[in-house]
Amino acid sequence: MNVLSLFDGMSCGRIALEVAGKEVTRYYASEIDEYAIKVTRAIWLMTIQLGSIVNWRDWDIDWKCIDLLIGGSPCQGFSFAGKQAGTTATLDGNDIMVTTREIYLDAKVKGAVFHSQSYLFWEYVLCLDHIKLANPNVKYMLENVKMKKELLQMISEIMGVEPVFINSALVSAQNRQRYYWANWQIEQPEDKGILLAEWQAGGLH
């Protein structure tokens, strides 16, 4: 399996694939944090680091070979903990709602100032569009936080699939509520009943 991971972090997607028993032939990672990249390189030296997602059009990739696209775009503009600005931007002194690919591309060309890094969601979408042209059978998954209904609907409409809501507390000692958009069926995991106290006490390894 050839994987392209956007907003890769320390390659937690690679960890999940290994736990799931999926064999990875080639793993492309788009990440800009130097410390996260160091962690990835320490574990998987053969990971192909590509840099910032905004430069995806320049990447030297055989796009038709990508079997799986994964990533969790920045959540600051979507999260209830933030300003919930979504992917809005300011252009010529006016605030604009960026709700389509066309509006995003036009705003970008005209030098709009986006209100949060969540605008990079659109780069994920455009990258996915490009891969689909080369490989219509590509599998994809996008992850993001709990957000207000309007933003959730916007992402779902753009992605073309409905999300599955999962709290990672079911399988870990962490309360992490997230939405997952994927073009395959995602099942709710069983509650393993893992408690933080057990980890701290060394009861789980």
Image (cartoon, helix red, strand yellow):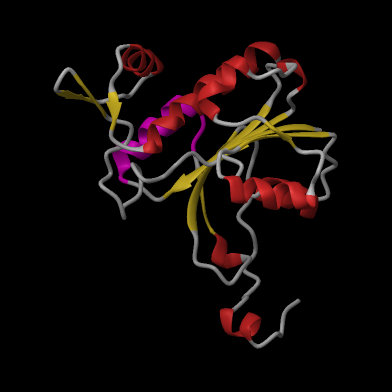
131 on left or right of 169? right
Q: How many labels does the image show?
A: 0
* Horizontal and vertical percent position of residue 165: 49, 51
Please indicate whether residue 97 sits to the left or right of residue 18 in the image: left
Q: Is 117 left, or right, of 25 in this rendering?
A: left
Q: Residue at x 37, y 35 (%)?
A: 153
**Magenta stretch?**
148-162
13, above or below 189, in the image: above
Q: Is residue 11 visible?
A: no
Does residue 26 sit above or below 168 in this rendering? Answer: above
Residue located 35% across and 12% down the image: 109
Q: Quadrant of the N terminus?
A: top right
Residue 191, magenta (yes or no)? no
Q: Quadrant of the C terminus?
A: bottom right
Residue at the location (45% across, 31% down)?
121
Which residue occupies the foreground of this view, 143 or 112?
112
Picture coordinates of residue 87 (x, y %)?
Answer: 33, 32
Q: Which of 118 and 187 is in front in this view?
A: 118
- Of residues 50 and 96, the one nearer the viewer is 50
Q: Is residue 156 magenta?
A: yes
Q: Is residue 139 above or below residue 74?
A: above
Residue 167, horizontal then vertical, whole percent = 52, 60
Q: Give the side of residue 88 with respect to residue 58, left or right.
A: left
- What residue sits 39% from the left and 37% below the top? 117
- Please identify the dominant SS of the magenta region: helix
Q: Which residue lies furthest to the left in this view?
A: 93
Query: Is residue 155 among the parts visible in the rendering?
Result: yes
Task: Tell me residue 118's x, y (percent).
Answer: 39, 37
